[in-house]
Image (cartoon, rainbow, N blue to C red):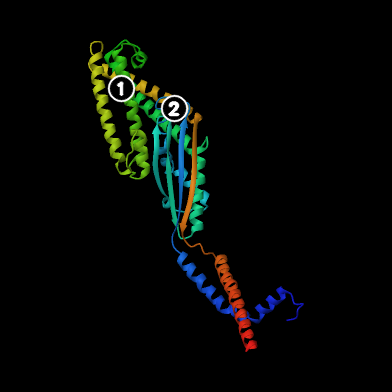
Amino acid sequence: MTGRTSGLQRDVEIVRRRAWVFIPFFVLGLIVAIVLHQRSSGTSSATSTIQLQTSIYDLASGGDQGFKVYDAQAMTRLPEFRQEVIDKIGDKSFDYSRFAIILNPNVTTEGVSSGNLVVTITDASRAKATTYQHAFVDVFTKEFTSPDGLFRTHFVKQQEAVATAADQQYQAAYQKLQQAVQQAGIDVPLSQLANSDQTGGYLDQLAQDRANTAAELARTDAAIQTVGGDASGAGGAVASSVLGQPVAGADAAAALKQHALVLGDAIKTIDTQLGAATGTTLPAGLGAQVQQVRALDAARTTAARDVANAQAAVASAFSSADATNTASGGNVSSLLALVAIVIGVTVVFGLIAIYLLEWLSQLRAASVSEA
């Protein structure tokens, strides 16, 4: 080379003269890419830990029953929630049951509830697992925090279902009482007999006790119908919401039925006390029937008030869902990544080898000239 030859031209000339050195390193790059591709192939796991919290600022006593983190987990089992996630994913054949959903409650007190909802899904492709993960988190966050989301609307619907059941029980008992009064020839307005707004101290207390017990029984019966034979975490969440304590999914139905039996026995005891208290003024058996209708009237009034309390709670509630997403495993070696590995190994190690050979060549030339 002449003295006018630039450093870049010199380097280019060296690389062109020894370009054959790149060949073995190109083969090495292919081998490295294949090995990395095989090792990275497998099942990818995408996990989201969603920190949940609900706070109700306008809370009537007991107005948050059905509006806690247990119910947030139960929301994920609703058919409309499942369908929304599937629609978000964009694959109608997607199996929603692939999501593993676990609730870890932290704080559950009146008006405040918090916990962590852990959602995991696996797939051979990390990209797909991440897509499914984000779809679930997006839908859950929207339905949990939005004013018109499923978490709130389903809570109000549950209270409305209890109110409807209580009213139906009252109407049925009222019809029976009407027939009994007509047969007994009692000259007392039926509306007065059936009205739960009575005076008398002891009777008032018994009627209130029965109303509270009947309302709890109606809530329990509604939960039993909801749970059915569901032994999953959703059934446990429903039972936990009614009973006020953690219940495993496998034990949900049995625990609710046992609770219903206890409530039924309590109502029978109260009915006996009511019948004894009214037996001197009404024919035998009719007094207890009158008090039952009054208790059911109080129960439906309580249920209607609970609906109003639920609507107020929903309007004043604050809920947050903060998700932390992680992913591991899976085939992360895309075609572009494999090509980049091959090029990187070929160029980097090839240039190192070329300049090493050039340096050794110059050393040999210097040794020969000195000799």
- For mark 2, give the secondary structure: helix
Where in the figure is residue 161, as x and y percent of width and height?
41, 31
Q: Which image quarter: residue 369?
A: bottom right
Which mark identifies residue 221? Answer: none
In the image: residue 170, left or right of residue 368? left
**Which residue is located at x 28 percent, y 33 percent?**
259
Q: Which of 66 and 81 is in front in this view?
A: 66
For the point 29% across and 41% down, which residue is it?
A: 251
Q: Which residue is the extreme one toward the right? A: 4
Q: In which quarter of the image is the N terminus?
A: bottom right
Sequence-wise, the earlier of marks 2 and 1 is: 1
Residue 317 placement, left or right of 19: left
Quarter of the rendering occupied by the C terminus:
bottom right
Residue closest to the eye, 367 or 339: 367
Q: Position of residue 24 (x, y in %)?
A: 55, 79
Does residue 302 lie above or below 347 as drawn?
A: above
Residue in view at x 35 percent, y 26 percent: 215
Q: Within 10 Å of the Cα at label 1, are there few (<14), some (14-19), or many (20+) other Cα atoms?
A: many
- Residue 179 can be seen, yes or no: no
Which type of secondary structure does the marked residue at label 1 adopt? Answer: helix
Amino acid identity at mark 2: Val
Residue 291 visible to an observer of this rendering: yes
Packing grade of label 2 (10 A; few <14, some 14-19, many >=20) is many
Q: Disc 1 residue type? A: Arg
Residue 307 marker: 2
Question: Which residue is labeled 1 in the image?
Answer: 210
- Label 2 vs label 1: CA separation? 20 Å
Q: In this view, does 235 lie above or below 345?
A: above
CB under 8 Å between discs 2 and 1: no
- Residue 343 position within the rendered picture, expressed as x and y whole percent measured from the top left: 59, 71
Q: Total label count?
A: 2
- x, y (%) of residue 284? 22, 16
